[in-house]
Amino acid sequence: MTEKTDNTEFDINQLPEPADIGDIIMNLMVNPNLSPLNYFNDFTDGGSDIDNLKEGRYNESNFFDAGNGKQFMSMTTHAMHHHLERDPQKAAEILVARAARKMICYGARPLALTAMLYHINYADPNGNNIAQGIKKGLENASAVFGVQISDRKIRFDHFDEHGNNAPTLIVTLVGVLNDNTEKQLVCMDPGFKSKGHNIFMLGRVTNDISTSDYLEFYHGISDSPLPQFDLKLEAQIAGSIKELVQLSLIDSAAPVAKGGVFFTLLRAGWLKGLGFDITTAAETRVDSFLFGEAMGRVIVSVSPENEDAFIDYMYELKTPYFTLGHVTKGEVRIDDQSFGYIDKMSGSI
C-alpha cells in the first residue's frame, strides 16, 4: 500500500503499476463502501422481474407500483461531497449522469430530479461560485437526458459550531418503466444470468484512477481531479442501453461505479454465485482498468445466441465497446490468472 503523498495535483504516473493485483483485491474487499454485505449499497440488489412486478411481488428494490398495477416507477439517490469544489459544474453533471445511467440500466426512463446543496459558506465568495457551477451543471445534464428539474435548493448552513463540513450535493432521480403501451414492458437488472454468457463493456477504456476508492483507500491519496467524463458519450451510452434493453439483446446491465470494473463484475455475479473470466486491455494499466472509476461505462452480459446480433447492432450504433470475456460457474480469472471463487471471496468479508 502506498503512503499518502503531498502532491496537490495527482497524476497516475506518480504511482508504479502494481505487480500484485491479488493484494489490491484483498485490501479493497474490506472497504465498507465496496462490501457486498453492506445493507445500504447496491451489492444486495435482487434485480427486477416483470412477472413479479405484474403480480404484485415487490421484493425488488429497483421499481415500485405507481398505484394502478400497470405503471411502475424507479427512484435512485446519489451524493457527492469530496472533490465537489474542484469543478462544481462537472461534479453536478457527473452526479446526474451517474443516476441516469443506473436508472437506464434498469430499463427505466428518467423523468425528473431534485437536487439539494448543503454546507455552503455564504460569507465566502467561493460558496457562490460553487452554487452557480452546480446550477449550470444540473441544467446541462438534465437537458441532455431529457429530465425535468422539479426542485433545487441550497441550504446555507455553514457555521463554525457545525465544524468544517465540505459542500455536499444530493441528487434524487425519479423515472418510469416504459410508459409507452405500444411497446413491450421490459426491465433489466445487474446480475449475470448463466455460465457461458459473454461480457462486454460499453464505453471507452482509459487510464484513470482519479477519485477512485482504489486511489483513496488503497494508496491513501485523497487529493485528485474528478474522473474522466464526457457528457455527450454518457448520452450515447444511455441511448444504446435503451435500445439494447428494448430489443432484448442483453441479459444484464450494470453501470461501472464504486470499485470500478472489478467490483461491478463482482456485484453482477455475487447473488447467483457466478464468476467471470476476463482479459484486460493491453494498452491500459491493469489497476486503472480494474479499479478506476471513469464515467460513461456499462457492463452487459449477452447470451451466445444473441452475440452476433449484439455485435452487429453495436456497429450500427457506433458506440465504443470492449470485449471483456465470459461468465464462469464461479471462478474469478483475470488475464489467465485465477483469483479463487466468488462465493469464497464474498463470504470472507
Image (cartoon, helix red, strand yellow):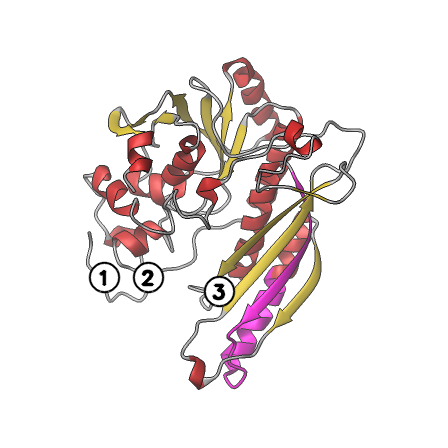
Apparent side of residue 30 relative to residue 322 in the rendered image (left or right): left
Q: Is residue 84 visible?
A: yes
52 and 209: which is toward the camera: 52
> What residue sits 58% from the left and 31% below the top?
318
Q: Is residue 151 above or below residue 40?
A: below
The answer for how far apart the CA atoms under marks 1 and 3 are is: 23 Å
Question: Mark 1 and 2 residues: CB-CB less than 8 Å, in contact?
Answer: yes
> What residue sits 40% from the left and 48% below the top?
38
Looking at the rendered structure, the kind of residue marked 3 is: Asp
Report x, y in % for residue 1. Answer: 19, 51
Q: Is residue 165 above or below residue 176?
A: below
- 130 is within the stretch colored magenta: yes
Q: Which residue is mark 3?
A: 87
Mark 3 nearby-residue class (10 Å; few <14, some 14–19, many ≥20): some
> What residue sits 39% from the left and 27% below the top?
273
Q: On residue 4, which mark appears?
A: 1
Q: Which residues are magenta?
A: 108-137
Looking at the rendered structure, the kind of residue marked 2 is: Ser
Mark found first going from the N terminus, 1 or 3: 1
> What residue sits 54% from the left and 75% below the top?
129
Mark found first going from the N terminus, 3 or 2: 3
Report x, y in % for residue 186. Answer: 67, 30
Q: Quadrant of residue 108?
A: top right
258 and 238: which is toward the camera: 258
Q: On residue 222, which mark appears?
A: 2
The answer for how far apart the CA atoms under marks 3 and 2 are is: 15 Å
Label 1's element?
A: loop
Report x, y in % for residue 40. Answer: 46, 50
